[in-house]
Amino acid sequence: MTETHTPLVSVIVPTFNQKPEYLRATIRSVLAQDFDDFELVVSDNHSIAETAAVMNEFDDERLHVVHPPEHLPMIPHFSFAAEQGRGKYLSFLPSDDLVEPDWLSTLVPAIERDEDASFAFGEIMGVVHDAPETVLYTCRDNKLASGTYDPEFLLK
């Protein structure tokens, strides 16, 4: 991707004093996507933890680190972080979450197929950070398959 390329997806990771090993794992999981048309925006909300050192470990043109002008409460920080994304689609990801390598290549076609879709999502699983293959729970207990849904249906 060149400097002037506008990515299709902006993955937004707001963070504040996250454990370095969690933040590192989150970033690695996003950068390992088999879908290339994205940017990863990590918004560091003036952490006093080792966030800057973790960011310096990565040399990837898709990764952009931003800082709000001052420390912000959570919701204003999320708003600031979202404004930094340049993509057609935004996806927020907590700074201690991991995504599968096909996360974006699965979700982007699903949302692109339906021009009325507001969002797309996949299964959410709780895992052990030291052993991500160990699933603690699934969010929807497989009652709602990954895909696109009418917002009215999801709000029932």
Image (cartoon, rainbow, N blue to C red):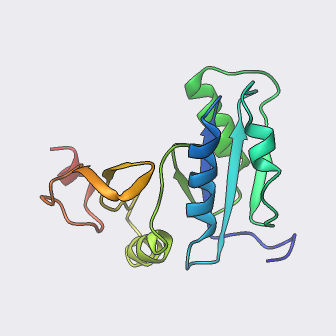
| x then y, percent, for residue 79 | 62, 35
* Residue located 36% across and 60% down the image: 121
Q: How many marks?
A: 0
Residue 49 in which image quadrant: top right
* Residue located 55% across and 62% down the image: 29
| x then y, percent, for residue 54 | 74, 46
Residue 27 in which image quadrant: bottom right
* Residue located 39% across and 79% down the image: 113
- Foreground: 33 or 143? 33
Residue 46 in which image quadrant: top right
- Quadrant in the picture for the C terminus: top left
In the picture, measured across the screen, residue 109 lies left or right of residue 54, that is left
* Residue located 64% across and 77% down the image: 36
- Foreground: 139 or 134? 134
- Foreground: 136 or 37? 136
Which residue is most to the front?
130
In the rendered view, tell whether residue 63 sits above or below residue 72.
Answer: below
- Foreground: 56 or 107? 56
| x then y, percent, for residue 73 | 61, 20
Q: Is residue 126 visible?
A: yes
- Quadrant in the picture for the N terminus: bottom right
| x then y, percent, for residue 95 | 56, 43
Q: Is residue 88 visible?
A: no
